[in-house]
Amino acid sequence: MKIEILGTGCSTCNLLFKIAQEAAAQMGPSANIEVTKVADVNYFLKVGVFVTPGLVIDGRVVSTGKVLTVEEILAAIKESS
């Protein structure tokens, strides 16, 4: 599973990245979740993210413009499985 945090490096984008890493760690290594940052504005537009931070799981935009909690990200991960 691939989780992408879309943002240009602002504090909320960095916070969402850390929270997504924590959520992935809670799922355990067997979940095989890769968390990455994406700063390419053209990619944001391609997937339809116009407000950062954006959270994308396996190519599906899950949220934009807010910092989710670990619990919210875990729920999104389970929904995407």
Image (spheres, grey):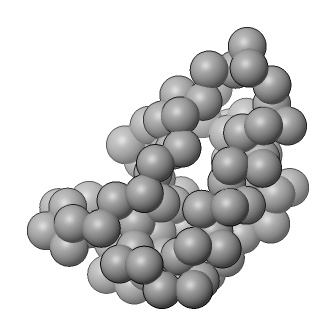
Question: Percent from the top left, x then y, of residue 47?
Answer: 26, 59
Residue 40 lies, with reference to residue 37, above or below; the image says below
| Front position in the image: 54 or 38 | 38
Question: Percent from the top left, x then y, of residue 3?
Answer: 51, 44
Residue 72 in sight in this render: no
**The image quarter in which residue 52 lies:** bottom left
Residue 35 lies, with reference to residue 37, above or below; the image says above
Question: Percent from the top left, x then y, of residue 4?
Answer: 45, 51
**Number of marks in the rendered image:** 0
**The image quarter in which residue 18 lies:** bottom right
Residue at 62 percent across and 20 percent down: it is 32
Residue at 35 percent across and 78 percent down: it is 8
Residue 9 lies, with reference to residue 59, above or below; the image says below
Residue at 46 percent across and 69 percent down: it is 54
Quadrant of the image containing the C terminus: top right
**The image quarter in which residue 51 lies:** bottom left
Residue 19 in sight in this render: yes
Residue at 37 percent across and 43 percent down: it is 59
Question: Percent from the top left, x then y, of residue 67?
Answer: 67, 76
Q: Is residue 22 left or right of residue 81?
A: right
